Amino acid sequence: MTAHPAYGELRAVTPVASVVLENNPGSMTLEGTNTWLLRAPGSESAVVIDPGYEDEPHLTKVLEQAPIELIVLSHRHADHAQGAPWLAARANAPIRALDANLCQDADPLTDGETFDAAGLTFGVLHTPGHTEDSICLRLTHNESRSVLTGDSVLGRGTTVISDLGPYLTTLRRLIEEPEGTTVLPGHGRELPDVATIAAEYLAHREDRLNQVRDALEQLGPDATPRQIVEIVYADVDKSLWSPAEWSVKAQLDYLRTQD
């Protein structure tokens, strides 16, 4: 397995995208939060995606890389968004997100919107499921395509979901992205093709849903998410059972809407 880069170091991933890894590893954050810096060649300023926690050593490293034109949040979770006000105050930069409550000196993002910053053009995709306010950002430069996925698609493993129906729609939407669109995730390493990964995620979710159906038949309709986790996730490390309960709850809610 490839070792992760050193915390606080800027690593170039594409000609326009670099990442600084925050030192916050864990079962939910993998190696840590990826803070992305995006700018066209020759641009003096950068767009920062997901500053991470209010972690001053990490944010200072981000601040040192380039003047910051704009900060964008993929969703509201603290490991992506908490440090944004600290960074914005020192960079004198606005904050944009789908949720207006996270924005500062700028309008909220909207699905289908395009905007220009740091010499690049970004396209906004509302991709709910992990959270209601989750977004992905399309980025095209010359012949290169990438999509910043936040926690909607991770560099390894699968993400925790809060609402399965919208998440299945999100995955089907990402499957439609052009072949060869690189995944720039909120956690984990970049991946070569978002459509392929989204298709794998969709198959996994459908398999899990069938397993939950089978567990309900075994346990009865009043089974709790925890009881189902103990069957469906029996081969998963128990440290991950609590977040698995959130996903099972989302699956149970989804199945009830299908009845």
Image (cartoon, rainbow, N blue to C red):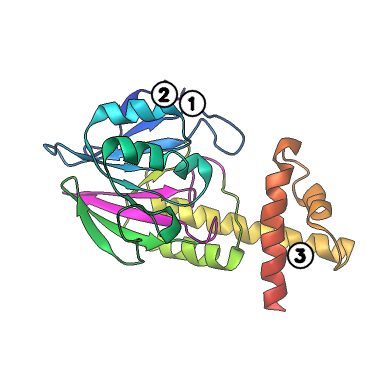
Q: Nearer the viewer, mark 1 or mark 3?
A: 1
Tell me the tag on residue 57: 2
Image quarter of residue 217: bottom right
Q: Amino acid at mark 1?
A: Asn
- Cα distance in 3D space between marks 1 and 2: 9 Å
Q: Residue at x 74, y 47 (%)?
A: 233
- Cα distance in 3D space between marks 3 and 2: 46 Å
**144 sits to left or right of 214:** left
Q: Nearer the viewer, mark 1 or mark 2?
A: 2
User: Badge 1 local density, few (<14 within 10 Å), some, or many (20+)?
Assistant: some
**126 sits to left or right of 257:** left
Q: Earlier in the sequence, mark 1 or mark 3?
A: 1
Q: Which one is nearer the viewer's eye here, 73 or 154?
A: 73
Is 173 located above or below residue 149 in the figure? Answer: below
- Give the magenta range: 129-157
Q: Amino acid at mark 2?
A: Pro
Q: Nearer the viewer, mark 3 or mark 2?
A: 2
Q: Secondary structure at mark 2?
A: helix
Q: Secondary structure at mark 1?
A: loop
What residue is disc 1 on? 23
**218 sits to left or right of 139:** right
Q: Residue at x 69, y 48 (%)?
A: 244
Q: Is residue 99 visible?
A: no
Q: x and y percent of residue 115 in the render? A: 23, 58
Q: Are marks 1 and 2 in contact (CB under 8 Å)?
A: yes
Tell me the tag on residue 174: none
Q: Earlier in the sequence, mark 3 or mark 2?
A: 2
Q: Amino acid at mark 3?
A: Arg
Q: Secondary structure at mark 3?
A: helix
Q: Are marks 1 and 3 in contact (CB under 8 Å)?
A: no
